[in-house]
Image (spheres, rainbow, N blue to C red):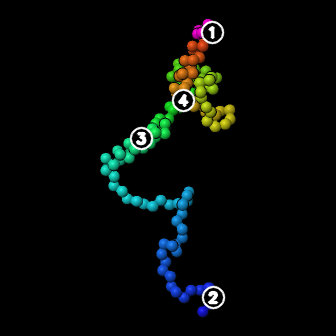
Amino acid sequence: MRRGLSTIPTPIGREHCSPRRRGLGARARGVAMDLTPQAVEQVAARVVALLQDRGLERAPEQMTAGELAHELRVERPWVYRHGHQLGGWRIGDGPKARWRFDRQTAIEARRRQQVEQQANGGG
Protein backbone atom coordinates (compact mmCIF):
# COMPACT_ATOMS: atom_id res chain seq x y z
CA MET A 1 0.00 0.00 0.00
CA ARG A 2 1.27 3.45 -0.90
CA ARG A 3 1.55 6.19 1.65
CA GLY A 4 -1.06 8.94 1.52
CA LEU A 5 -3.73 6.91 -0.25
CA SER A 6 -6.71 5.65 1.63
CA THR A 7 -8.12 2.20 0.97
CA ILE A 8 -11.39 2.99 2.76
CA PRO A 9 -13.99 4.24 0.31
CA THR A 10 -15.55 7.53 1.38
CA PRO A 11 -19.07 8.45 0.39
CA ILE A 12 -19.44 11.61 -1.60
CA GLY A 13 -21.62 13.84 0.49
CA ARG A 14 -22.17 17.54 0.82
CA GLU A 15 -18.96 18.06 2.72
CA HIS A 16 -16.96 16.69 -0.21
CA CYS A 17 -18.67 18.71 -2.94
CA SER A 18 -17.35 22.00 -4.15
CA PRO A 19 -18.25 24.87 -1.83
CA ARG A 20 -21.36 26.84 -2.62
CA ARG A 21 -20.72 29.93 -4.63
CA ARG A 22 -21.59 33.20 -2.97
CA GLY A 23 -21.49 36.76 -4.17
CA LEU A 24 -21.76 38.14 -7.67
CA GLY A 25 -21.20 34.83 -9.44
CA ALA A 26 -23.66 32.89 -7.32
CA ARG A 27 -26.64 31.22 -8.91
CA ALA A 28 -30.02 31.60 -7.28
CA ARG A 29 -31.78 28.49 -6.15
CA GLY A 30 -35.27 28.05 -7.43
CA VAL A 31 -37.77 28.10 -4.61
CA ALA A 32 -41.39 27.59 -5.47
CA MET A 33 -43.85 29.50 -3.31
CA ASP A 34 -47.48 30.20 -3.68
CA LEU A 35 -48.42 33.39 -1.86
CA THR A 36 -51.99 34.31 -1.22
CA PRO A 37 -53.08 37.87 -1.97
CA GLN A 38 -53.31 38.42 1.79
CA ALA A 39 -49.70 37.31 2.26
CA VAL A 40 -48.56 39.67 -0.50
CA GLU A 41 -50.42 42.55 1.17
CA GLN A 42 -48.79 41.72 4.51
CA VAL A 43 -45.33 41.72 2.94
CA ALA A 44 -46.03 45.04 1.18
CA ALA A 45 -47.32 46.63 4.38
CA ARG A 46 -44.23 45.47 6.26
CA VAL A 47 -41.89 46.91 3.61
CA VAL A 48 -43.70 50.27 3.76
CA ALA A 49 -43.46 50.28 7.55
CA LEU A 50 -39.73 49.55 7.43
CA LEU A 51 -39.11 52.31 4.89
CA GLN A 52 -41.11 54.82 6.93
CA ASP A 53 -39.13 53.92 10.04
CA ARG A 54 -35.97 54.84 8.15
CA GLY A 55 -37.41 58.08 6.78
CA LEU A 56 -37.34 56.77 3.21
CA GLU A 57 -41.06 56.85 2.59
CA ARG A 58 -40.75 58.98 -0.54
CA ALA A 59 -37.86 60.01 -2.70
CA PRO A 60 -37.75 63.59 -3.94
CA GLU A 61 -39.58 64.22 -7.19
CA GLN A 62 -36.85 64.79 -9.77
CA MET A 63 -37.56 67.08 -12.69
CA THR A 64 -35.68 68.02 -15.82
CA ALA A 65 -34.85 71.64 -16.62
CA GLY A 66 -37.65 71.74 -19.18
CA GLU A 67 -40.23 70.37 -16.76
CA LEU A 68 -39.13 72.82 -14.08
CA ALA A 69 -39.25 75.74 -16.52
CA HIS A 70 -42.83 74.85 -17.36
CA GLU A 71 -43.71 74.50 -13.67
CA LEU A 72 -42.17 77.87 -12.76
CA ARG A 73 -43.41 79.57 -15.94
CA VAL A 74 -39.94 80.69 -16.98
CA GLU A 75 -37.73 79.97 -19.99
CA ARG A 76 -35.45 76.94 -19.90
CA PRO A 77 -32.23 79.06 -20.23
CA TRP A 78 -33.29 80.90 -17.06
CA VAL A 79 -33.45 77.55 -15.23
CA TYR A 80 -29.93 76.68 -16.44
CA ARG A 81 -28.55 80.09 -15.33
CA HIS A 82 -30.08 79.69 -11.87
CA GLY A 83 -29.60 75.93 -11.55
CA HIS A 84 -27.53 75.95 -8.37
CA GLN A 85 -29.78 78.54 -6.72
CA LEU A 86 -32.74 76.28 -7.43
CA GLY A 87 -31.02 73.35 -5.73
CA GLY A 88 -30.25 71.52 -8.97
CA TRP A 89 -27.48 69.03 -9.56
CA ARG A 90 -25.75 67.86 -12.68
CA ILE A 91 -25.80 64.26 -13.79
CA GLY A 92 -22.39 63.45 -15.23
CA ASP A 93 -19.47 65.63 -16.21
CA GLY A 94 -18.80 67.88 -19.12
CA PRO A 95 -20.36 70.98 -20.60
CA LYS A 96 -23.57 69.21 -21.63
CA ALA A 97 -24.23 67.29 -18.42
CA ARG A 98 -27.94 67.11 -17.71
CA TRP A 99 -29.55 68.89 -14.79
CA ARG A 100 -32.05 67.45 -12.32
CA PHE A 101 -34.09 69.35 -9.75
CA ASP A 102 -36.12 68.41 -6.72
CA ARG A 103 -39.52 69.92 -7.38
CA GLN A 104 -40.26 71.15 -3.85
CA THR A 105 -36.76 72.54 -3.26
CA ALA A 106 -36.82 74.45 -6.56
CA ILE A 107 -40.28 75.93 -5.94
CA GLU A 108 -39.27 77.11 -2.46
CA ALA A 109 -36.03 78.62 -3.83
CA ARG A 110 -37.98 80.45 -6.55
CA ARG A 111 -40.41 81.88 -3.97
CA ARG A 112 -37.48 83.13 -1.87
CA GLN A 113 -35.99 84.78 -4.97
CA GLN A 114 -39.27 86.52 -5.73
CA VAL A 115 -39.62 87.78 -2.14
CA GLU A 116 -36.05 89.12 -2.19
CA GLN A 117 -36.65 90.85 -5.52
CA GLN A 118 -39.78 92.53 -4.22
CA ALA A 119 -38.00 93.59 -1.01
CA ASN A 120 -35.18 95.14 -3.07
CA GLY A 121 -37.63 97.14 -5.17
CA GLY A 122 -37.34 94.89 -8.22
CA GLY A 123 -40.45 93.70 -9.96
Q: Where residue 102 is drawn, which disc sits there? A: 4
| x then y, percent, for residue 119 | 60, 9
Residue 34 magenta? no
Can residue 36 be seen by looking at this rendering? yes
Q: Are marks 3 and 1 in contact (CB under 8 Å)?
A: no
Q: Which residues are magenta?
A: 118-123
Disc 2 residue type (three-letter): Arg
- Farthest top residue in view: 121
CA separation in Å, label 3 and label 2: 63 Å
Q: Residues within 10 Å of mark 1 (few under 14, many from 20)?
A: few
CA separation in Å, label 2 and label 4: 73 Å
CA separation in Å, label 3 and label 1: 47 Å
Disc 1 residue type (three-letter): Asn
| x then y, percent, for residue 40 | 35, 47
The residue that mark 3 highlights is 49
The residue that mark 1 highlights is 120
Q: Tell me: residue 18, above or below residue 64.
A: below
Comparing labels 2 and 4, the label whose residue is closer to the camera: 2
The local secondary structure at tag 3 comes to helix
Image quadrant for the C terminus?
top right
Q: Where residue 45 is drawn, which disc sits there? A: none
Comparing labels 3 and 1, the label whose residue is closer to the camera: 3
Q: Are marks 2 and 4 in contact (CB under 8 Å)?
A: no
Residue at 33% x, 55% y: name it: 34
